Image: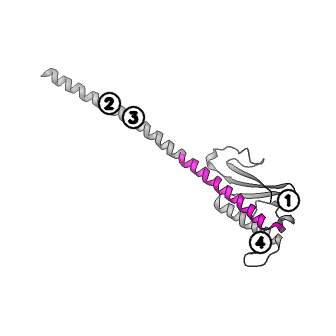
């Protein structure tokens, strides 16, 4: 009877150790899954911003194609990151240059609303083509500088460049 009691006491301690080891292994697995989920969310966020950037470059390109008189006049040759004041060309009749200013204002307003600290520029001319550049802040960059960005751009800034010829 004494040996059976001793055997039961040894088994209780051993199964407790097994439970503790199992809990440790499971907790490492759960931590790994949590890291995987966080990584997936981060990648999804980056893909979302790049998709918006792609659509926004298509937006200004379509605006330029719709206003070829403004393109020929050079009204789109150097659109800056600032949002200009413009008249409402939907409600009022506008010249091709005024339409270009309206397009610039609407486009950069959309950039600032859809992308974190989003701004866009357009440079070039009809003969050489245009370079459309979108910039936005991306905290997932961890202090890096995007090699696509021009010199002097702050860290954690992502740049999306598109060449375009109307």
- Residue on which disc 3 sits: 24
Measured Cα–Cα span from mark 1 to mark 3 = 65 Å
Residue 16 visible to the viewer: yes
Image location of residue 127, percent across then percent down: 87, 57
Q: Of the two numbered discs 4 and 2 on the same chain, state the one appearing first in sequence.
A: 2
The circle on residue 126 is 1
Earlier in the chain: of badge 2 and badge 1, it is 2
Position in image of residue 131 (x %, y %): 79, 54
Of the image marks 2 and 3, the number of the one nearer the N terminus: 2
Q: Quadrant of the C terminus?
A: bottom right
Marks 1 and 3: which is nearer the front?
1
| Mark 4 element type | loop
> Where does the image place residue 99, in percent across and percent down from the top left?
79, 71
Q: Which mark is residue 86?
A: 4
N-terminal of the pair, mark 1 or mark 4, is 4
Mark 2 and mark 1: Cα distance apart in space = 74 Å
Q: Are marks 2 and 3 in contact (CB under 8 Å)?
A: no
* 142 relative to 81, above or below: above
- Please check the rendered image and state whether residue 66 is part of the magenta-colored stretch, yes or no: yes
């Amino acid at each position: 009877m004494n040996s059976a009691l001793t055997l039961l006491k040894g088994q209780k301690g051993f199964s407790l150790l097994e439970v503790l080891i199992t809990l440790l292994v499971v907790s490492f697995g759960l931590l790994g899954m949590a890291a995987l989920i966080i990584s997936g969310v981060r990648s999804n966020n980056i893909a979302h911003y790049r998709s918006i950037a792609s659509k926004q470059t298509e937006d200004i390109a379509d605006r330029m194609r719709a206003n070829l008189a403004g393109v020929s006049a050079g009204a789109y040759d150097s659109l800056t990151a600032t949002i200009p004041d413009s008249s409402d060309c939907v409600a009022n009749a506008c010249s091709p240059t005024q339409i270009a200013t309206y397009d610039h204002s609407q486009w950069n307003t959309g950039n600032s609303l859809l992308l974190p600290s989003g701004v866009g520029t357009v440079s070039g001319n009809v003969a050489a083509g245009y370079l459309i550049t979108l910039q936005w802040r991306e905290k997932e960059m961890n202090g890096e500088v995007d090699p696509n960005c021009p010199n002097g751009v702050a860290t954690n800034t992502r740049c999306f460049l598109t060449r375009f010829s109307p």
